[in-house]
Amino acid sequence: MKHVFIINPTAGKSNQSKELSEQIKIAFDGYDYIIELTKEEYHATELVKQYANTGEDICFYACGGDGTLNEVVNGVYGYPNAKLAIVPIGTGNDFIKYFSDYTIDDFLKLKNYHETIDVPSDLLTCNGRICLNIASVGFDANVVQKVERFKRLPFVNGKVAYLLSVFNCFLSSMKFHHSLVIDGETIPAKDYIFIVAANATYYGGGFNPTPSATIDDGLIDVLTINALSRLRVVSLISKYKAGKHLDYDFVTHKQCKKIQILGDKEIILNMDGEVTPEMNPEITLLSKAITLVLPKK
Ligand SMILES: Nc1ncnc2c1ncn2[C@@H]1O[C@H](COP(=O)(O)OP(=O)(O)OP(=O)(O)O)[C@@H](O)[C@H]1O
């Protein structure tokens, strides 16, 4: 088995990639390993495909945050000779929070990967894009989209851009009017704040929309939140973060294999933090479509 480490040098804190490369050299001395540094957005997907196309059995280590992980997953998907491991050196690292009996250090201690456990995982797909963790439309997807715009302003770093974006989306219209088709059942159009289609449990820096989601159950967990007043939204943030929002009457939680979101205009779709405008997006589950490699502790 070859070990290919894909490092995003811009993820998380600065200068981590050099330190991580040194740690890999020590931990994988004597192993068949390669270290690759990404040069730009989507380079990780390209690199993974190049190596996977050789047909060799390879474990790819996504070294970065959730964005890097998504790009590596998009490369690994479709290659039975490829597996995926995670070295969470990003800012949020939300996906790994699903593994509640692991700490972040369990993933960062590279020698832990000398012995591993294979875990199959479902994936979500929409218009040829693959998502490992969570897809969403509405308020949170709009926030992700506007962060990129605010980051282009002078003197605005990632955190400030995020706060500006939340503030901006909060002051804009927070609702959208769409109907849903969930496994063939139509839910007539109404006003929502957001809709989440989840494979796992955490996103957006520790929010827990679908606490009971399981990555290998062959089902998408769909959460919908109806339009609410701004005051009500503010009062519910901490409950949403803690995953204690499911009993409210303006919240629904369902499980399905396919969800279509239908409306008369484009909507921003967030898939693992990557956003695109979509007309009537259809999100489908791909059952046990990837093998995750977890370190044995
Ligand atoms: N060399 C590079 N230069 C600029 N951007 C890059 C480079 N390599 C990857 N990227 C982009 O960096 C973005 C952010 O990476 P990532 O999400 O992994 O880190 P993060 O934002 O620190 O972590 P998290 O998403 O967990 O909060 C990704 O969208 C990726 O496409």
Image (cartoon, rainbow, N blue to C red):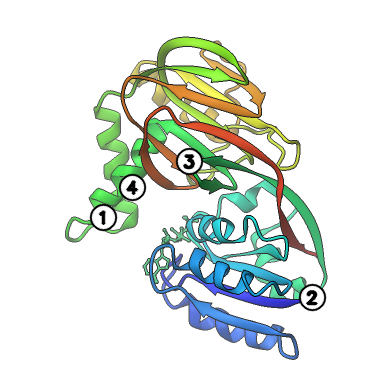
The reply to whether residue 10 is in sight is yes
Residue matched to label 2: 114
Q: Report how far apart the C-alphas of labels 4 and 3 lie in the structure.
A: 27 Å
Q: Report how far apart the C-alphas of labels 4 and 2 lie in the structure.
A: 38 Å
Left/right placement of residue 123 relative to residue 155 reads: right
Residue matched to label 4: 162
Q: Earlier in the sequence, mark 4 or mark 2?
A: 2
Dividing the picture into quadrants, the one containing residue 112 is bottom right
Left/right placement of residue 284 relative to residue 157 reads: right
**SS at mark 2 in the image:** helix
Circle 2 Cα neighbour tier, 10 Å, few/some/many (<14 / 14–19 / ≥20): few
Residue at mark 3: C-beta within 8 A of ligand 1: no
Amino acid of disc 3: Asn
Q: Nearer the viewer, mark 4 or mark 3?
A: 3
Amino acid of disc 2: His
**SS at mark 1 in the image:** helix
Dividing the picture into quadrants, the one containing residue 295 is bottom right
Q: How many marks?
A: 4
Number of the label disc, if any, that sits on residue 127? 3
Residue matched to label 1: 151
Q: Report how far apart the C-alphas of labels 3 and 1 lie in the structure.
A: 27 Å
Quick one: which residue is furthest to the bottom in this view?
Answer: 30
Q: Nearer the viewer, mark 2 or mark 3?
A: 3
Q: Quadrant of the C terminus?
A: bottom right
